Image (cartoon, grey):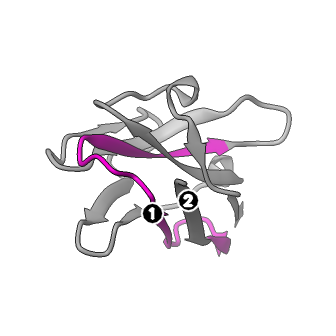
């Protein structure tokens, strides 16, 4: 059984930083990808950043490129999202997700999801 558990998030002011963590367990193949997605009130879920677990290849949404960094700790089965220079438009519920196979950026390509963690950025 695959489990995805996020932690971190919270409240920040514009320009501040936050880090999200996500631990995954139960995947039986090393060929998989982990991603961070977000959903603001009244909007659809969108990809933020994705990393391939073994190769380390990454993808970022244009809105966060240069501000957010996705990384992983292979030994700890944990992926991180370092969010710098936060903006009010980054306010959303952030979800971690996993998929077997290669890098994808669409939420529809990820079958395993965490419960989400709220990030709120005030101006």
| Image location (x, y in percent) of residue 46 | 59, 32
Are there few (<14), some (14-19), or many (20+) residues within 10 Å of tag 2? some
Instruction: Give the residue at the far right of this rendering.
Output: 42
Reply yes or no: does residue 22 show up in magenta.
yes
Magenta stretch, main secondary structure class: strand
| Image location (x, y in percent) of residue 12 | 65, 73
- Indicate left or right for 52 with 7 as reference: left
Q: How many marks?
A: 2
Marks 2/1 in contact by CB < 8 Å: the verdict is yes
Are there few (<14), some (14-19), or many (20+) residues within 10 Å of tag 1? few
| Image location (x, y in percent) of residue 36 | 50, 48
Helix, strand or loop at label 2? It is strand
Q: Nearer the viewer, residue 45 or 32?
A: 32
Quarter of the rendering containing residue 61: top left
Q: Which residues are magenta?
A: 9-38
Instruction: Give the residue at the far left of this rendering.
Output: 55
Residue 48 sits above or below residue 95 on the image: above
Q: Which residue is mark 1?
A: 25
């Amino acid at each position: 059984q695959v489990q995805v558990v996020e932690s971190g998030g919270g409240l920040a002011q514009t320009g501040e930083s936050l880090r999200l963590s996500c631990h995954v367990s139960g995947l039986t193949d090393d060929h998989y990808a982990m991603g961070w997605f977000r959903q603001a009130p009244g909007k659809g879920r969108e990809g933020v950043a994705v990393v391939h677990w073994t190769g380390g290849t990454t993808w970022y949404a244009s809105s966060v490129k240069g501000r957010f960094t996705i990384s992983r700790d292979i030994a700890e089965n944990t992926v991180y999202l370092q969010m710098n220079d936060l903006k009010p438009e980054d306010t959303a519920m952030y979800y971690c997700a996993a998929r077997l196979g290669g890098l994808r950026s669409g939420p529809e390509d990820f079958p395993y999801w965490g419960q989400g963690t709220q990030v709120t950025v005030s101006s």
